Image (cartoon, rainbow, N blue to C red):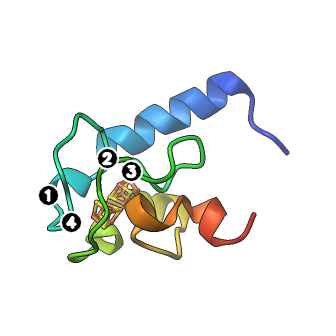
Amino acid sequence: MEMSPEEMQKKKEMVLSMCVCAKCPSWVECGEKGGYCFPTIGKSSCITEEKGCICGGCPVTEKLGLTHGYYCTRGSEKEQLGM
Ligand code: SF4
Ligand code: SF4
């Protein structure tokens, strides 16, 4: 079942509030807020070098059952699943 826009927005805010990307070695400061795993956010427009990914230790990975990483360079979980 598709989520309503309001539910998506709430979920996005939840993801952004828990995101640990800013502590990651690959992080590049350019005004973004992280949350790259989320489908309506996706890839970063400034992170291009993969220098390590700490998504595995992020509470969002467990909460949403994520299976990938490097969402900033490779795209959201959905995108990497080919959806
Ligand atoms: S899983 Fe990664 S991209 Fe997603 S919120 Fe956590 S640290 Fe950010
Ligand atoms: S998605 Fe992974 S690699 Fe990219 S900034 Fe977040 S923790 Fe680092």
Q: Is mark 4 within 8 Å of ligand 2?
A: yes
CA separation, marks 3 and 4? Answer: 11 Å
Q: Which mark is residue 32?
A: none
Q: Which mark is residue 18?
A: 2
> Left or right of 76: which side holds 31?
left
The residue at which mark 3 appears reads as 44
Crowding near pointer 2: few (<14 within 10 Å), some, many (20+)? some
Q: Which mark is residue 26?
A: 4
Q: Residue at x 40, y 47 (%)?
A: 35
Image location of residue 65, percent across then percent down: 54, 67
Mark 4 or 1, closer to the camera: 4
The N terminus appears in which quarter of the rendering? top right
Kind of residue sitting beneath label 1:
Lys
In the displayed structure, would residue 12 be above or below residue 56? above
Residue 54, image quadrant: bottom left
Kind of residue sitting beneath label 4:
Ser
First reached walking from the N terminus: tag 3 or tag 1: 1
